[in-house]
Amino acid sequence: MFPVRRNPPRAGTPDAAAFDELPLATCPSGVRATILRIGCGAGDAQRLRAMGLVEGTDVDVVDTRSGILLDVRGSRLALGSGLAAAITVQLVSP
């Protein structure tokens, strides 16, 4: 009869993962996130993976004033906003 409206699950529950995914470019400074997907071109994706930005890696967002500055495994990595928008992450901590 009427469509069932489902509220988003609470954070920390198994069904919450799909709701926690967002582009890296939208993350604010000071958060930690896990890389889920790298959706840019093959050449850019290969270069990012060679620098340690691979799926499953935790990154800390250091600065977002001009592009995005990340701490990846103890190294700093600066990305432009277009490239950061093509990377999907899941927040680990606010």
Image (cartoon, rainbow, N blue to C red):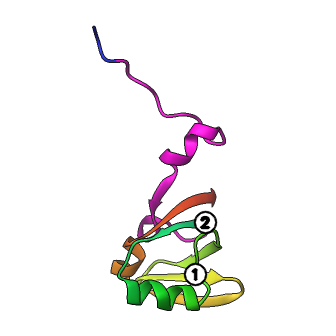
Which residue is label 2 attached to?
Answer: 34
* Mark 1 Cα-neighbour bin, 10 Å: few <14, some 14–19, many ≥20: many
Amino acid, disc 1: Leu
Residue at label 1?
53
Mark 1–mark 2 CB contact (< 8 Å) = no
At numbered mark 1, what does the secondary structure look like: helix, strand or loop?
loop
Circle 2: residue type: Thr
Looking at the image, can residue 48 be seen? yes
**Distance of label 1 from label 2 (alpha carbons):** 10 Å
* 6 or 66: nearer the viewer: 6
Could you tell me which residue is drawn at 52 percent across and 64 percent down? 89
* Magenta stretch, residue numbers: 4-32
> Residue extending furthest right?
74
52 drawn magenta? no
Which residue occupies the foreground of this view, 25 or 14?
Answer: 14
The x, y position of residue 46, in whole percent, is 48, 88
Q: Quadrant of residue 2?
A: top left
